[in-house]
């Protein structure tokens, strides 16, 4: 074979389909073998190929059973799952295959073109997003260092830029906790939040610390000529405070910002809490002129109801929905519907987790207003954020880390 050519095996009981696809792949210089029954395929044969096209609806041993057999092989080929059934079956089968540790390049729903196969065969196998995991250590070990960092104002706050989807101009940033706790060491933000939540007053003080830092940061990028909002996550414990809105308004005013320059991202607990105190605080924040973002849109089924129940001004599409929209038609339809619904309601839409040019193209195709993610920038200290803004010279240039082909 020529350099860059591959060895394919098509496992499908439709002989005509195998012949047609095999001829097309062979015409491109690839080696192709076929079979219609999994019992006729030997393990050493599969171990010698690059890509296995596996039909789910096979006789005797179906595609799901074949995944279990492949998982027990010392070396299993990379997989493309194929089927004439709905995408739900393909999607579930891909999840099963990856859970077995197999390299699933993607799925194809019949009919498809040989070019679709070659495109998937050239795709690198991306690692699955990490699953949520509990804190690496008990909260009681974190609490002393966390309480001290909050009290002394030394808890790191980082900033992930938000940019316009159409031209990549800077539109603000989200304030996020860093991954290091002074006096303790590396620790992920979810562990910090979980520890602080055990002492509600500490969680309130932590949130107000982030707010102060975020307000000062926003004021600083305004001073160097960049407009744009700052977004802060707002836990339920803060909303339950009797003087919550007054305290928040005072901090923002002391930082020389107006309420309209601050967006509060309502956490899951805040969104689904029905207490009069929490709902009253949400309404008062909006009456005071603050923006309210509905975070993780598309993660929970009842999220759409919150658009009717809460005076939100912005919705952030959950990054997991974007990941699914890269491949699945239904996920893309849901993504598009959320964007359309947001715009019909006069609400700005943010796509989180934009990691590639393909993600950017998808966001632009469906009219997303803002994007956020590693394609633009990781979260970074304020000093780095300001340095990159200064390097640009003015706010009319695209704000993005140097990347080939980003425009």
Image (cartoon, grey):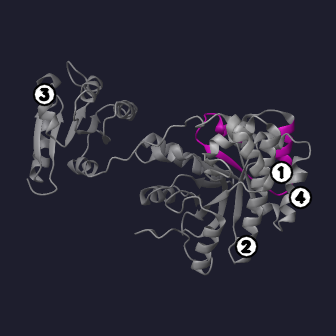
Residue receiving disc 1: 285
Measuring from the top left, give residue 346's x and y in whole percent.
Answer: 69, 55
Residue receiving disc 3: 41
How would you rate the neighbour count of disc 1 (Cα within 10 Å): few for under 14, some for 14-19, many for 20 or more? Answer: many
| Residue at 60% in and 55% down | 350
> Which stretch did the figure color magenta?
277-306
Measuring from the top left, give residue 75's x and y in whole percent.
Answer: 22, 35
Contact flag, marks 3 and 4 (Cβ < 8 Å): no
Q: Nearer the viewer, residue 207 or 358?
A: 207
Is 19 displayed left or right of 101 in the figure? Answer: left
| Callout 3 secondary element | loop
Measuring from the top left, give residue 296's x and y in whole percent.
Answer: 62, 44
Q: Which of 236 and 17 is in front in this view?
A: 236
Residue receiving disc 4: 250
| Residue at 45% in and 59% down | 361
Is 80 displayed left or right of 131 in the figure? Answer: left
| Callout 1 secondary element | helix
| Callout 2 secondary element | helix
Q: Residue 222 carries which label?
A: 2
Would you place residue 3 above or below residue 328 in this image? below
Contact flag, marks 4 and 2 (Cβ < 8 Å): no
Q: Earlier in the sequence, mark 1 or mark 3?
A: 3
């Amino acid at each position: 074979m020529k350099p860059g050519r591959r060895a394919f095996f098509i496992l499908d009981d439709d002989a005509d389909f195998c012949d047609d696809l095999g001829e097309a792949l062979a015409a491109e210089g690839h080696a192709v073998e076929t079979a219609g029954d999994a019992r006729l395929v030997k393990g050493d044969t599969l171990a010698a190929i690059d890509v296995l096209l596996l039909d789910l609806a096979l006789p005797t041993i179906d595609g799901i059973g074949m995944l279990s057999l492949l998982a027990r092989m010392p070396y299993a080929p990379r997989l493309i799952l194929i089927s004439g059934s709905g995408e739900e079956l393909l999607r579930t089968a891909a999840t099963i295959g990856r859970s077995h540790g197999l390299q699933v390049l993607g799925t194809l729903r019949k009919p498809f073109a040989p070019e679709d196969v070659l495109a998937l065969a050239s795709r690198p196998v991306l690692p699955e997003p990490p699953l949520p995991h509990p804190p690496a250590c008990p909260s009681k070990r974190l609490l002393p260092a966390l309480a001290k960092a909050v009290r002394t104002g030394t808890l790191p706050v980082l900033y992930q830029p938000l940019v316009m989807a159409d031209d990549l101009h800077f539109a603000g940033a989200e304030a996020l906790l860093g991954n290091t706790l002074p006096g303790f060491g590396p620790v992920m933000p979810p562990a910090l939040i979980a520890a602080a939540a055990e002492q509600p007053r500490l969680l309130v003080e932590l949130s107000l610390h982030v707010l102060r830092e975020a307000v000062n940061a926003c004021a600083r990028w305004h001073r160097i000529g960049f407009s744009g909002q700052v977004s802060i996550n707002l836990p339920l414990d803060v909303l339950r405070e009797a003087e919550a809105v007054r305290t928040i308004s005072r901090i923002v005013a002391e930082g020389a910002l107006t309420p309209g320059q601050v967006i509060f991202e309502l956490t899951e607990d805040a969104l689904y809490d029905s207490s009069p105190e929490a709902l009253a605080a949400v309404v008062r924040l909006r009456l005071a002129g603050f923006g309210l973002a509905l975070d993780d849109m598309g993660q929970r089924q009842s999220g759409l109801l919150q658009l009717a129940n809460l005076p939100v001004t912005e919705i952030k599409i959950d990054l997991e929905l974007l990941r699914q929209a890269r491949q699945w038609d239904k996920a893309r339809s849901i993504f598009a519907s959320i964007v359309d619904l947001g715009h019909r309601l006069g609400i700005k839409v943010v796509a989180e987790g934009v990691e590639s040019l393909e993600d950017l193209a998808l966001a632009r195709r469906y009219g997303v207003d803002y994007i956020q993610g590693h394609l633009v920038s990781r979260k970074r200290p304020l000093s780095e954020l300001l340095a990159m803004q200064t390097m640009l010279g003015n706010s009319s240039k695209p704000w993005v880390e140097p990347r080939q082909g980003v425009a």
